[in-house]
Image: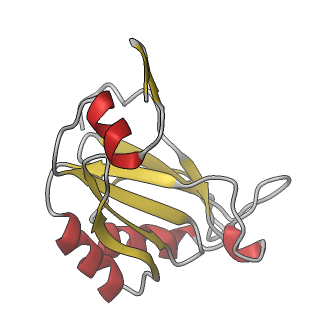
Amino acid sequence: MSERKPTIGPLLWYLDPTAAIAWLEKAFGFQTQMVVEDGQGGVIHSELTLGDGYIMVVGPPDGRSTSPAAFGGRSTQSVHVQLTEGLDALCERARAAGAPIEREPADQPYGDRVFTCRDLEDHPWSFGQTVQVLSAEEMSKATGLAIKTQGGVSS
């Protein structure tokens, strides 16, 4: 990753951030760039990269923060990763690392191939790979939905 970080970088809270970092490397291929430990088994800050994106893993949660694992598996967000290649192989890698696959890889009517899974603390993840570039009109026709773009609405 270059010196300049992407504009958006999700921060994920984990009960066991050290285990989460190792698992994210194994399951999804993230590369750890930095870890700032708190000296008591926690992680104050970390940066993991995948392609030209990054995430931060911290924990254990405190105050108003939580992990889905401590919240009955419920979450208010999902992390999406858009790949340029290798979606099916990544799904198998994630499955081998123990990720519950919620949606098997499948081609979508809007031109992407997608799978979804959960990580070791129940954070939801989706992975997509464009397999066919479609116009808004083509996506609208394929999905039967009106699709709004900067140029207007397709129906």
Between 6 and 82, the one lying in front of the other is: 82
Which residue is painted at 18% across and 73% down in the image? 89
Vertical relation: 137 (above or below) 103: above
Question: From the image, which quarter does the N terminus lie in?
Answer: top left
Between 110 and 9, the one lying in front of the other is: 110
Which residue is painted at 80% across and 58% down in the image? 62
Vertical relation: 43 (above or below) 1: below
Where is residue 28? Give x, y as percent. Answer: 32, 67
Considering every residue shown, the one lying at the far top of the view is 151
Where is residue 143? Give x, y as percent. Answer: 39, 47
State how the image is colored.
secondary structure
Residue 31 in sight in this render: no
From the viewer's perspective, tell me whether residue 44 is left or right of residue 102: right
Vertical relation: 60 (above or below) 103: above
Considering every residue shown, the one lying at the far right of the view is 63
Question: From the image, which quarter does the C terminus lie in?
Answer: top left
Where is residue 103? Give x, y as percent. Answer: 42, 74
From the viewer's perspective, tell me whether residue 20 is left or right of residue 93: right
Residue 69 in sight in this render: yes
From the viewer's perspective, tell me whether residue 31 is left or right of residue 9: left
Which residue is painted at 24% across and 70% down in the image? 90
